[in-house]
Image (cartoon, rainbow, N blue to C red):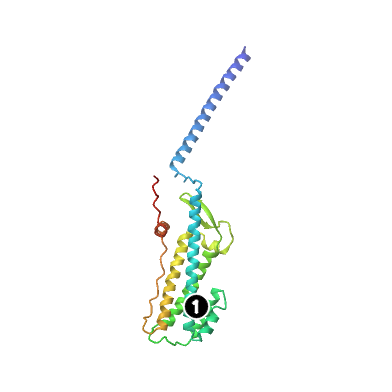
Amino acid sequence: MLTRGFDEAFALGLLVGVRRFAGWHAWDLLSRVKEREDSMAAAPERPVIRYPTDKEVREAFVAYVEAVGRVAHAWNYLMETMGRLFVIVSGIDRTIAAAIWYASDNDRVLLEIFKAITAKAPELGWEGKKDAKADVLWLAERVSNLHDKRNNAVHAPCSLLVEPDGPTMVPQLFSDHRRAKNLRGTELLVEFDWCERWANALTTFARAAEQALLYGDCPWPEKPDKPDRMQKKALLAQRRRLRIELHPPQPQSSQE
């Protein structure tokens, strides 16, 4: 009887202990769940990224290609204008000067030749134009600095990235290409637009300087200020308005 009573007491105590343990474990589990719920409620919601439509992908790619093309066109026009200016400031025979300028397809080499010859060239036709030679050398230095930006735009490998606000083109994330690394952390469309506008401003100055050296009655131009970079939303809105102006939507004909 004593043994039986002991066994029953032990079994009863074990049952009570199990229930207490289970109750404590359940309470602990509920506490952890509540803490997790509280932390999730306090944490900011993660943005939901949806798969883009074919139209959105196409628009992102077209905007990128258009921006690269605008940079390339602005740069080519700038270098052609610099070539005409080189013919004038070099002070040598026009045919020979043009042959020198077009002898190389390396823009960096051409700009170094431009600076070297301009610095040593006689100041024929520069009379009455204060700081004209210094300004032309300033121009050549700014164009040389922009050359690296142009190369980043034209040569960097880029790919599509899907972000919460839609797809966009970015420098390839895992590429070791030097040009891709140079563009990381930048908004490509914003950077390329700035590069295009700066190239156009330098072109305008170079053309005005050319006219001032050719014709004595033309005033010497003021050096342009470097433009600010636009906000991406403002830039996209501007390009959208331009696109609508160039290709206005056609009214749909009513069917009888």
Element under label 1? helix
Q: Is residue 27 above or below residue 15?
A: below
Q: Is residue 32 above or below residue 218?
A: above
The crowd level at tag 1 (other Cα within 10 Å; few <14, some 14-19, many 20+) is: many
Q: Nearer the viewer, residue 134 or 154?
A: 154
Task: Specify whether 10 is left or right of 129.
Answer: right
Quarter of the view holding residue 177: bottom right
Give coordinates of residue 174: x percent, y percent: 58, 56
Give coordinates of residue 255: x percent, y percent: 40, 46
| Tally of marks | 1
Disc 1 target residue: 83
Give coordinates of residue 101: x percent, y percent: 53, 79
Give coordinates of residue 190: x percent, y percent: 45, 61
Tell me the amino acid under the disc marked 1: Gly
Q: Residue at x 48, y 34 (%)?
A: 31
Q: Nearer the viewer, residue 122 or 24?
A: 122
Q: Residue at x 45, y 76 (%)?
A: 139
Q: Is residue 213 above or below residue 68?
A: below
